[in-house]
Amino acid sequence: MSTKRKRMFSKELKHMMYGFGDVREPLHESIDLLEELVFEFIQEMTLKAAQVSNKRGKFQTEDLVFLVRKDPKKYYRVIELLRMNEELKKAKKAFDETNVEEEENV
């Protein structure tokens, strides 16, 4: 890495590497390289999404979806993750409402 920064994805990358057939404890250099690639990808996508959103003036999730629309694997994964996020929000809301009702009945 050219500049030192806090490792943000090391634990997750280590588990992903193991899940894809690497050893349980991969080399730190391998993790560092992958982390650099992930960071650069996120940075690049964020900058592109910001450029797209400048036309509307507001950064939205749809800007990222727009950027990956031509890559079917990324597109459908993004759609799946957004759907799962909505389901989690609904489940959390329902759970919170149930807890409020139970507390009121006590």
Image (spheres, grey):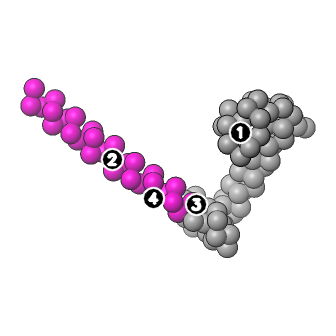
Q: Which mark is residue 77?
A: 3
- Please state which amino acid type lies under the numbered disc 3: Arg
Task: Write down the quadrant of residue 15 in the picture.
Answer: top right
Per the model, the C-alpha gap separating discs 4 and 3 is: 10 Å
* Cβ–Cβ under 8 Å for marks 4 and 2: no
Furthest residue toward top: 106
Task: Determine whether, in the image, residue 102 is placed left or right of residue 38.
Answer: left
Circle 4 residue: 83
Residue 65 pos. (x, y %): 59, 65
Q: Is residue 50 above or below residue 26?
A: below
| 3D distance between C-alphas at marks 4 and 1 | 27 Å
N-term-proximal mark, 4 vs 1:
1
Q: Which residue is mark 2?
A: 91
Q: Nearer the viewer, mark 2 or mark 1?
A: 1
- Quadrant (top left/top right/bottom left/bottom right) for the C terminus: top left
Q: Which mark is residue 18?
A: 1
Q: Amino acid at mark 2?
A: Ala
Magenta span? 78-106
Identify the mark at residue 87; answer none if there is no mark.
none
Comes first in the chain, label 2 or label 1 = 1
Q: Nearer the viewer, mark 3 or mark 1?
A: 1
